Amino acid sequence: MPIVFIYGLGAFGYAIIKHLDRHKRSSYVIVGYDRDQELMESLRKKRRHLHHQTDQSISKSIILPESPDELFTTADILILAVTASSIPEIVKKLSKIKRHRKKLIVINVAKALDFKTGKRLELVVKKHLKHLHSYVYFAGGTIASDLYNSHPLGATIASKNIRALDIAEDLLASPNLRLYRTSDVSGAEYCGAFKNIISIFAGLVSGLGWPYGSETFFISRFSREVERFVVKELRGQLKTFSMDSQCWGNDLWMSCTGKTRNREFGYLIGQGMTVKQAFNQMAKQHKAVEGFTSISILKKLCHDFSSYPFLLAMQEIIIKNKPPRKIIKSLIESQTI
């Protein structure tokens, strides 16, 4: 049977493990690995996660190796379920492992850009992973707990390689998870990264005490600005930014209004925490905030943000720690949105 190797067993990686355990264990060998050895030990002994869905377990059919070397050598599919900032280091290490199989399908689920260069993660993987591979990007309105509990969900899978899309769809699709295919990898990746920024902004508005109508007003205008920014500055395809797009409309709607990490981070700041305090609070809950990474590298994507007031405002609030209420009020008063 084909071997699928999930690298990273945080909230979403663990949800993928459970999803595959439930739907695909009869047709795939499922391997899970995380650099947290305490977590791995708990999973091996109790089949339960230390931090997520702790009252439920995974089956004994899931293989949990001592090191990635054990089964990566023969893996057919690699799922990178780690933060964007971890990807360069991880793929460099994996490149040093001699593989017995030539072609590898890499499925990336991180919704951010490279924190050093601002490049898309497809390009980062291509640069550092020396093994022959095809790249697939996965994004949609899929909160980890919802995927774990097998609720109805939709997602986009993006690749320039049709065979890779076929393989990814066969692996991930299930009665509860509907997948939609596209060849616009760059557009899908920008959707995933920028919707997190808008989600933080939505949390800010809520934390400041403004009503739901204010949130949806800002979300609608901010999303339009991002569409314009990606198409003009980054040469993205406008068709990817439609409401029925799972990597944009669905993910944006879910991330901005649901119980998501980026929204929670923004809410904490709106409630009065500093950026550092909010970041530390999220870390205590073992929740990564990938929207923070995307905001921090915006200046690498564009030198002049005068035509993009929302993106400029997020840099002022998150990077320069300026008062969110004052910055957001100035957006309205300036009539630039």
Image (cartoon, helix red, strand yellow):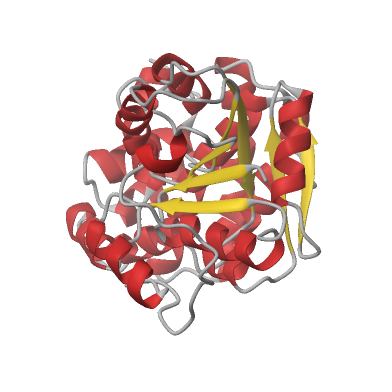
At x 42% / y 73%, what residue is drawn? 47
* Residue 244 image offset from top left, x and y in percent: 80, 47
* Residue 67 image offset from top left, x and y in percent: 31, 45
17, above or below 231, in the image: below
Q: Nearer the viewer, residue 171 or 141?
A: 171
Left of 320 or right of it: where is 66?
right
> Most extreme residue toward the bottom, as rendered?
55
Question: In which quadrant of the rendered view does residue 91 lie?
Answer: top left
277, above or below 67, in the image: below
Question: In which quadrant of the rendered view does residue 185 lie?
Answer: top right
Q: Nearer the viewer, residue 22 or 289?
A: 22
Q: Is residue 202 visible?
A: no
* Residue 69 image offset from top left, x and y in percent: 36, 37
What number of labels is visible?
0
Q: Nearer the viewer, residue 228 or 288?
A: 288
Q: Nearer the viewer, residue 328 or 116?
A: 116
Q: Is residue 10 visible?
A: yes
Q: Quadrant of the C terminus?
A: top right
At x 30% / y 24%, what residue is drawn? 116
Left of 121 or right of it: where is 216?
right
Question: In which quadrant of the rendered view does residue 204 lie?
Answer: bottom left
At x 64% / y 33%, what residue is drawn? 188
Left of 251 or right of it: where is 328?
left
* Residue 114 image offset from top left, x and y in percent: 38, 28
